Image (spheres, coloured by chain):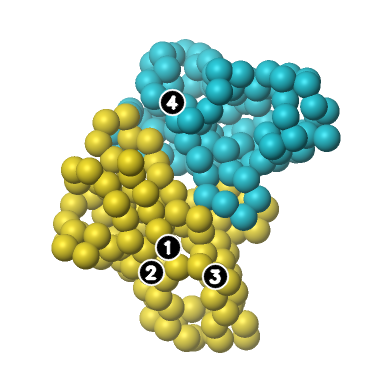
Chain colours: A yellow, B cyan
């Protein structure tokens, strides 16, 4: 079945540091890929998405590129801020009724 | 455009009781999905409803059931509550079953 593997956290970075959170997936067909963010005490917010190979999703300075050859969708940001502290979930939506399969989440803490 | 809302925010029940959680989808969204998020884990797909019919189900027992209404509201019902049912329950709505899902803030259920 479909699965998502993302790097374990927590990840602690200083403000303005470069961020990479690794994500790889297993799925049949051609899934859509997502990054969701969950701030403390809140639900999930869609951060960015990509629906086909080589697509780049971007939002709020975050980027991720759909790499079919390596089945990866790594999240990057050039300069993190304290306000980026949250849990980040990589996810995929496969063919059919679009159930979303999530990774276990990576907690990011940005310190001033 | 209004977002996805859920009620109540928090709920405490005892083992063996029944609970109903409610969700109000974005206007025009014909699809609602429900997820269970245990502490420190990614959300797990419970089921999806499309135009008031169940459209897919994850690995959850029949005591988890749902309803979707024509006014874009929906319910998740859980019978015979168990301690392991303690979790954050998220609903997500989308235009149809092929579209990106947008999540509500969740209901935190505690079973004692």
Chain designation of label 3: A
* Residue where numbered disc 4 is placed: B57
Chain designation of label 2: A
Label 3 crowding class (10 Å Cα cut-off): few <14, some 14-19, many 20+? some
Q: Looking at the image, which residue is at 37% across and 63% down?
A: A23
* Residue where numbered disc 1 is placed: A6
Circles 3 and 1: CB atoms closer than 8 Å: no
Circles 2 and 1: CB atoms closer than 8 Å: yes
Compare residues B77 and A8 and report the one nearer the observer: A8
Q: Quadrant of residue B80?
A: top right
- The secondary element bearing badge 2 is classed as loop
Q: Do the residues indicated by labels 4 and 3 lie within the same chain of the protein?
A: no
- The secondary element bearing badge 1 is classed as strand
CA separation in Å, label 3 and label 2: 11 Å
Chain designation of label 4: B
CA separation in Å, label 4 and label 2: 29 Å
CA separation in Å, label 3 and label 1: 9 Å
Q: Which of the two labelled residues, at mark 2 and mark 1, occupies the earlier sequence position?
A: 1
- The secondary element bearing badge 4 is classed as strand
Compare residues B51 and A74 and report the one nearer the observer: A74
Position of B10 with respect to B26 (left or right) is: right
Q: Quadrant of residue B83?
A: top right
Q: Do the residues indicated by labels 3 and 1 lie within the same chain of the protein?
A: yes
Label 1 crowding class (10 Å Cα cut-off): few <14, some 14-19, many 20+? many
| Disc ID at residue A22 | 2
């Amino acid at each position: 079945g479909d699965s998502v593997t993302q790097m374990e956290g927590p990840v602690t970075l200083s403000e303005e540091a470069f961020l990479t959170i690794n994500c790889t997936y297993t799925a049949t067909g051609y899934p859509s890929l997502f990054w969701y963010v969950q701030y403390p005490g809140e639900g999930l917010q869609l951060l960015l998405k990509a629906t086909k190979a080589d697509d780049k999703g971007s939002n709020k300075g975050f980027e991720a590129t759909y790499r079919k050859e390596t089945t990866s969708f790594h999240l990057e940001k050039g300069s993190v801020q304290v306000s980026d502290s949250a849990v980040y979930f990589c996810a995929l939506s496969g063919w059919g009724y679009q159930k979303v399969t999530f990774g276990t989440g990576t907690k990011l803490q940005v310190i001033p | 455009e209004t977002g996805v809302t859920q009620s109540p925010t928090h709920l405490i029940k005892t083992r063996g009781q029944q609970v109903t959680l409610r969700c109000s989808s974005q206007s025009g969204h014909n699809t609602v999905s429900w997820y269970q998020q245990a502490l420190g884990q990614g959300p797990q797909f419970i089921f999806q409803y499309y135009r008031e019919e169940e459209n897919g189900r994850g690995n959850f027992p029949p005591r988890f059931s749902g309803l979707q209404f024509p006014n874009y509201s929906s319910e998740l019902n859980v019978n015979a509550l168990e301690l392991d049912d303690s979790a954050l329950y998220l609903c997500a709505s989308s235009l149809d079953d092929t579209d990106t899902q947008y999540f509500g803030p969740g209901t935190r259920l505690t079973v004692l």
